[in-house]
Image (cartoon, rainbow, N blue to C red):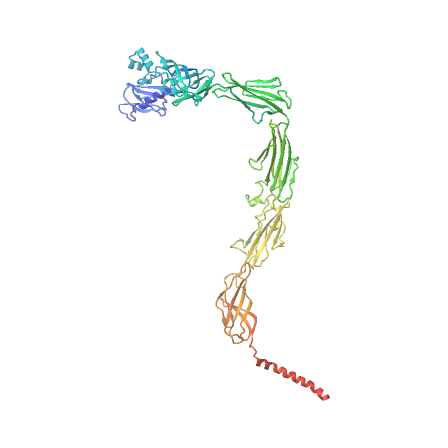
């Protein structure tokens, strides 16, 4: 508080005591923080004491005084000591009627409060100070006024009064930032209990040319700031605004500034203005005035806005025609049509009067309509699934509606009411958190509905996914609210039926290892095992599904039930790419298909076969030549070989490996040193000294010259001539 400012300043300027010395000293201590206290020696010199820490100091030998301070005023229960002392019990003493500063001030503004005009006013103030506190502008005020009177004025009260008169100002205000001036009449008084002074002055201030008048009240921390200041304004003026309004009470034209409660120095700013009537308005929660429901109470709150520090008084008057139904001085009024015995569709007149403390009144009237009819609607709902060609209409008169999972549900409504404003439309559902659709008068929406998170999915364990789950049921509701607050509602249970296909998930394994880039079946190797363990359906249990399996577009007879198809073995497969298709159908007729392509790789080893041999040139026996030999390799892995004809062989060759796309094909040329007469036999020799022979179907023979052809033809020709001659001989004999 401002009363303690001077005491605190004296404490800060006092010399620090000696801490920790024990010889030739007095130990002063307490078991608790002392709070505000003053400590001084027999010369009146102050020693600072921390009010928030227990006392533990050593003081020089001598006579010492300790006193408690309340609101900046030293109290009468003075503790005198000259030896080590525990002051805990002294600090715990309760002061029943603490000494305090009292008094007050009054600034009466006479007027005129106008632009560029001189303001006349009167100022009066008084202050009463306990004699335990001296004047702050004289030395050793903590020793009290009696000490100062004796030391400074030789106990001459008249001399002291004159000093007060000469050293005390008006202590008032500034008007439009310029100090108000006047000649003060100051009188001091003094008795055995207290002392103080009173001030009276006629003062004036000069207004500037702005539209708003400002009054500044200084807060400097002197003793006078401990008292309240009353300010009175001439009619029709009032206080309009103050940043320090928390410290101002009273009426708009007669208010009090509680200066002692303001904890900082500066100015209290007060804006002055001409009083105007309050601004009138009202509101009703969940109502759109002037429409109010017939069957429900309606509470209308007043809002009387005024530019001053005091709220205006509210008065409600409710009439039906010329009959007054309610007349209440209150900040709100509740209209209950049933209690007032009113009829549906009745018009009422409501008037609100707002009166400020100076008697100015603002008012507003409104014609209210008692709406007792619920809003009506024309509504349609339908859904469209991606598998359907046309939308399906829903019977909104049923409590339960069914739509397939994944369908888009659409709703449209046209709402009406007997009152003029459009009807508020609100759709709600627990489909998702905060799902709401809002509209006014006419509204349409659409949204997709699927099974909820409780159904089977990959967020569950495989055992949980194999269990049956219930269909998802959402709630769906519509609420129509008219301007009066009448509500029409309808709700449905929205069942999401099963339109989601099962999820077959075949997994292949070979020798217990799952099929992958590093583990593929080999022609002639172990058979491929198929597991459907990871399959599931969103609603049905796994045992409720029926199954079919196709391999390379051909049905595979492995069964149709879960027990049969849970795991099965594929037949032996040739090298190449194969397609496995697994179909699963749930109890609702939804079929899920999983198609997978897998490879069967060639066998490992030497699987060479000669497919074509071409003889180059026309050379015969004994002549050189060459063969172009084409081979296919049906195996994988590195195979080294050479091709031979009799004694002629190629260098070491590496066979082209077979792949899943087919055998490896290669053509190599074998040079022949000398053809041998007869069939051409090709030999494939491997690095392990094994070999294979292939008959090429080719033969080597000598080429025929003309002489050789004549020698070859002459014997048959001679035989034919001889036969002819023999045939002619019998004919000649007959002739």
Compared to residue 627, the image places residue 728 above or below, namely below
Q: Position of residue 323 (x, y in %)?
A: 62, 17
Closer to the camera, 154 or 421?
421
Q: Position of residue 108 (x, y in %)?
A: 42, 15
Q: Which quadrant: the N terminus?
A: top left
Closer to the camera, 663 or 201?
201
Q: Residue 82 vs residue 716: left or right?
A: left
Residue extending furthest toward the right: 734
Q: Position of residue 645 (x, y in %)?
A: 52, 71
Image quadrant in which you'd find residue 574 = bottom right
Number of numbered callouts drawn: 0
Q: Is residue 268 visible?
A: yes
Compared to residue 389, the image places residue 145 above or below, namely above
Q: Is residue 37 visible?
A: no
Q: Position of residue 151 (x, y in %)?
A: 29, 15
Q: Which quadrant: the C terminus?
A: bottom right
Residue extending furthest toward the left: 24
């Amino acid at each position: 508080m401002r009363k303690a400012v001077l005491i605190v300043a004296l404490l800060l300027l006092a010399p620090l005591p000696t801490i920790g010395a024990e010889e030739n000293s007095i130990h002063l201590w307490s078991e608790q923080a002392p709070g505000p206290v003053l400590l001084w020696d027999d010369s009146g010199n102050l020693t600072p004491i921390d009010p928030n820490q227990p006392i533990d100091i050593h003081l020089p030998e001598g006579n010492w005084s300790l006193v408690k301070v309340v609101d900046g005023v030293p109290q009468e229960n003075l503790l005198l000591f000259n030896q080590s002392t525990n002051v805990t019990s002294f600090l715990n003493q309760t002061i029943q009627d603490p000494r305090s500063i009292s008094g007050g001030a009054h600034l009466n503004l006479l007027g005129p409060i106008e632009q560029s005009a001189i303001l006349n006013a009167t100022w009066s103030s008084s202050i009463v100070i306990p004699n335990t506190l001296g004047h702050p502008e004289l030395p050793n005020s903590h020793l009290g006024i009696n000490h100062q009177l004796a030391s400074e004025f030789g106990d001459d009260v008249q001399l002291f009064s004159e000093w007060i008169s000469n050293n005390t100002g008006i202590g008032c205000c500034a008007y439009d930032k310029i100090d108000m001036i006047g000649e003060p009449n100051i009188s001091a008084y003094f008795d055995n209990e207290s002392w103080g002074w009173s001030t009276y002055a006629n003062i004036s201030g000069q207004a500037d040319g702005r539209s708003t008048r400002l009054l500044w009240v200084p807060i400097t921390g002197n003793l006078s700031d401990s008292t309240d200041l009353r300010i009175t304004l001439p009619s029709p003026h009032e206080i309009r605004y103050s940043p320090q309004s928390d410290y101002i009470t009273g009426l708009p034209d007669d208010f009090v500034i509680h200066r002692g409660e303001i904890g900082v120095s500066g100015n209290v700013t007060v804006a002055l203005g001409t009083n105007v009537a309050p601004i009138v308005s009202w509101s009703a929660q969940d109502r759109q005035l002037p429409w109010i429901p017939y069957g429900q109470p309606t509470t209308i709150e007043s809002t009387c806005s005024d530019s001053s520090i005091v709220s205006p008084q509210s008065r409600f008057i409710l009439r039906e025609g010329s009959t007054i139904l309610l007349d209440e001085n209150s900040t709100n009024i509740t209209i209950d049509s049933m209690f007032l015995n009113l009829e549906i569709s009745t018009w009422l007149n409501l008037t609100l009067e707002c009166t400020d403390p100076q008697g100015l009144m603002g008012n507003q009237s409104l014609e209210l309509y008692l709406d007792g009819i619920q809003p009506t609607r024309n509504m349609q709902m339908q859904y469209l699934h991606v598998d359907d060609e046309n939308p399906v209409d829903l019977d909104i008169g049923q409590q339960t509606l069914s739509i397939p999972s994944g369908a888009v549900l659409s709703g449209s409504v046209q709402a009406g009411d007997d009152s003029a404003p459009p009807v508020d439309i609100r759709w709600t559902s627990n489909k998702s958190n905060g799902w709401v659709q809002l509209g006014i008068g006419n509204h349409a929406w659409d949204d997709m509905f699927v099974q909820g998170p409780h159904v089977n999915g990959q967020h569950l364990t495989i055992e949980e996914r194999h269990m049956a789950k219930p269909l998802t049921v959402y709630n769906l509701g519509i609420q129509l609210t008219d301007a009066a607050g009448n509500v029409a509602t309808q709700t449905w249970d929205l069942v999401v039926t099963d339109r989601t296909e099962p999820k077959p998930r075949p997994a292949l394994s070979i020798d217990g290892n799952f099929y992958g880039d590093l583990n593929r079946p080999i022609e002639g190797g172990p058979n491929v095992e198929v597991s459907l363990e990871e399959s599931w359906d969103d609603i049905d249990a796994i045992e409720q599904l029926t199954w079919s399996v196709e391999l390379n577009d051909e049905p595979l007879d492995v069964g149709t039930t879960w027990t049969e198809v849970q795991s099965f073995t594929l037949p032996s497969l040739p090298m190449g790419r194969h397609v496995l298709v697994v179909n699963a159908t749930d109890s609702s007729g939804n079929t899920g298909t999983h198609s997978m392509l897998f490879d069967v790789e060639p066998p490992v080893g030497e699987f060479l076969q000669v497919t074509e041999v071409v003889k180059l040139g026309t050379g015969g026996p004994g002549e050189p030549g060459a063969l172009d030999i084409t081979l296919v390799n049906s195996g994988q892995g590195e195979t080294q070989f050479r091709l031979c004809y009799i004694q002629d062989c190629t260098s070491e060759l590496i066979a082209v490996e077979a792949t899943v796309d087919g055998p490896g094909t290669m053509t190599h040329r074998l040079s022949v040193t000398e053809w041998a007469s007869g069939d051409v036999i090709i030999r494939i020799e491997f690095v392990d000294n094994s070999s294979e022979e292939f008959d090429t179907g080719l033969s080597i023979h000598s080429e025929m010259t003309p002489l050789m052809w004549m020698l070859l033809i002459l014997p048959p020709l001679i035989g034919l001539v001889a036969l002819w001659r023999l045939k002619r001989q019998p004919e000649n004999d007959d002739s």
